[in-house]
Amino acid sequence: MKHTRQLSRCAVAWLTLLLVGSAFADNSKISPDLLPLLTNPSNSVNVIVQYNSSLTSGGIIGGIINLLGDVVNATFSLIPADSATMTAANVLTLSNQASVSYISLDRPLNATLDYSAAAVNAPFACRQRSVFSSRPYSG
């Protein structure tokens, strides 16, 4: 019971500090294409939060993201970063954390045809192979 009360006081103190800090958000840590989406504080956005060191990824900041009521979608293993769904107000709050280096919009990725048969001229390569090989080209 004593630990629960102490934990709730600590959580309230953290929330108070974070909410007060949101009034003075560090916009230099927020990507320019994300800033227009932050005008509505209740707007939910998918972001990637990058950290100064790998020790904070998914740890303290991940706990703060969850404490604020947001969701950590993934913790990256190659870079110190998390993918999260957050409200715009909480993105501004998180930008004040010293361990956060940059917050960017989590953009959707699309497949490209960079490695398709046409892009690498595969029919030509196969014809060249058939010239130098005893097996005929069957394409």
Image (tube, rainbow, N blue to C red):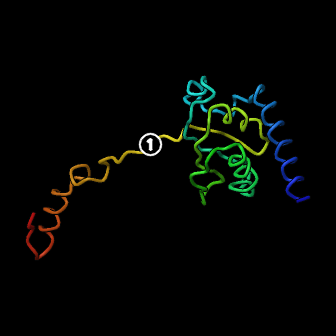
- Does 30 sit above or below residue 63? above
> Which is nearer the eye, 61 or 135?
61
Q: Position of residue 137 (x, y in %)?
A: 9, 67
Q: Of all residues shown, which one is farthest toward the front?
A: 1
> Which is nearer the eye, 53 or 22?
22
Q: Position of residue 3 (x, y in %)?
A: 88, 59
Residue at the image position 88 percent from the left and 52 percent from the top: 5
> Which is nearer the eye, 21 or 111?
21
Q: Position of residue 18 (x, y in %)?
A: 79, 36
Q: Quadrant of the N terminus?
A: bottom right
- Can you identify the residue that label 1 sits on? 108
Q: Position of residue 136 (x, y in %)?
A: 8, 71
Residue at the image position 88 percent from the left and 47 percent from the top: 9
Residue at the image position 61 percent from the left and 40 percent from the top: 86
Q: Of all residues shown, which one is farthest toward the bottom?
A: 134
Q: Amino acid at mark 1?
A: Pro
Q: Residues within 10 Å of mark 1 (few under 14, many from 20)?
A: few
Q: Quadrant of the C terminus?
A: bottom left
Q: How many marks?
A: 1
Rendered image quadrant of residue 123: bottom left
